[in-house]
Image (cartoon, rainbow, N blue to C red):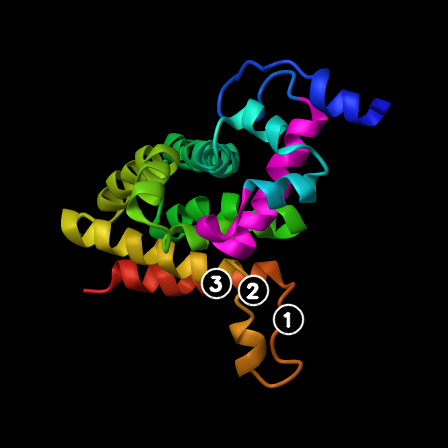
């Protein structure tokens, strides 16, 4: 057994989680497994990804993946929640900071919701998560429902509450509908579907213009929220 294999198979110890971010003392190898799995789940979906393929991509044994995560669903769950819970926490922090500064307007609320996810477009790994997040809505309910609720349920309800204060005439059901439609809009717009490159004349659209992207999505969503 060479030294590299020994480090990956025998030297790691279970890590203790500390909050929604990375676990305290997490090994580099464990993060490499999560990064490899994130890419594969994003590209192939849950059913299309095997632990064997993740192990090959991460250059570890399948036994090591099972040691850390227990099962394919355990790995999928950790991949999704390691970023999803951070996004949710950042959304809450953005919103509460706005509320503390005064009554937030609809545009500010929408941007506060979108910005934590938008920043993921800055890295290839973040873009993989955006594709994974969009794919989650097509995964079977037994996989997707609990993960979405665990990651985003609390923050989404808080946004509904604040939006209804900003728009007093907006009914509760309408508020939930429009937040759901906002989520669908940003998932499509942020997840590299390349539809705009296909539709627009060459040179008209810049896929790397992040500010233009969030401005377009924000104006569209705000218009929907404020519609009678």
CB contact under 8 Å: marks 1 and 2: yes
Secondary structure of residue under mark 3: helix
The numbered disc on residue 189 is 3
- Is 137 placed above or below 58 here? below
Q: Nearer the viewer, mark 3 or mark 1?
A: 3
55 to the left or right of 182: right
Q: Nearer the viewer, residue 61 or 87?
A: 61
Residue assigned mark 1: 206
The part of the chain drawn in magenta is 27-50
Which quarter of the figure has residue 65?
top right
Which residue is label 2 attached to? 212
- Residue visible at 63% across and 63% down in the picture: 209
Tell me the crowding category of disc 1: few under 14, some 14 to 19, or many 20 or more residues within 10 angstroms, Cα based.
few
Spot occupied by residue 50 in the image (x, y as percentages of width and height): 54, 45
Q: Residues within 10 Å of mark 2 (few under 14, many from 20)?
A: few
Instruction: Farthest residue to the right: give it.
Output: 2
Depth check, mark 2 against mark 3: the one in front is 3
From the top left corner, tell me how far across and down residue 201 is, in percent. Answer: 60, 86
- Mark 3 packing: few (<14 Cα in 10 Å), some, or many (20+)? some
N-terminal label among 2 and 3: 3
- Closer to the chain start, of discs 3 and 1, is 3
Label 1 and label 2: CA atoms lie apart by: 9 Å
Q: Secondary structure at mark 2?
A: helix
């Amino acid at each position: 057994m060479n030294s590299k294999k020994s480090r990956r198979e025998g030297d790691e110890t279970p890590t203790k989680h500390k909050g929604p971010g990375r676990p305290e003392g997490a090994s580099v190898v464990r993060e490499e497994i999560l990064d490899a799995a994130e890419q594969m789940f994003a590209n192939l979906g849950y059913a299309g990804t095997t632990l064997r393929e993740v192990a090959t991509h991460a250059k570890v044994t399948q036994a090591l993946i099972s040691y850390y995560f227990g099962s394919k669903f355990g790995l999928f769950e950790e991949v999704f929640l390691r970023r999803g819970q951070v996004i949710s926490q950042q959304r809450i922090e953005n919103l509460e900071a706005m509320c503390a500064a005064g009554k937030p307007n609809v545009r500010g609320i929408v941007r506060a919701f979108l910005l934590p996810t938008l920043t993921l477009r800055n890295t290839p790994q973040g873009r993989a998560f955006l594709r994974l997040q969009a794919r989650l809505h097509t995964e079977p309910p037994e996989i997707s429902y609990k993960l979405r609720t665990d990651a985003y349920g609390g923050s989404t309800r808080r946004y509904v509450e604040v939006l209804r204060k900003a728009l007093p005439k907006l009914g509760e059901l309408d508020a939930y509908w429009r937040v759901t439609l906002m989520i669908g809009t940003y998932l499509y717009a942020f997840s590299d579907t390349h539809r705009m490159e296909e539709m627009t004349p060459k040179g008209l659209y810049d896929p790397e213009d992040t500010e233009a992207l969030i401005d377009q999505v924000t104006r569209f969503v705000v218009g929907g929220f404020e519609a009678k």
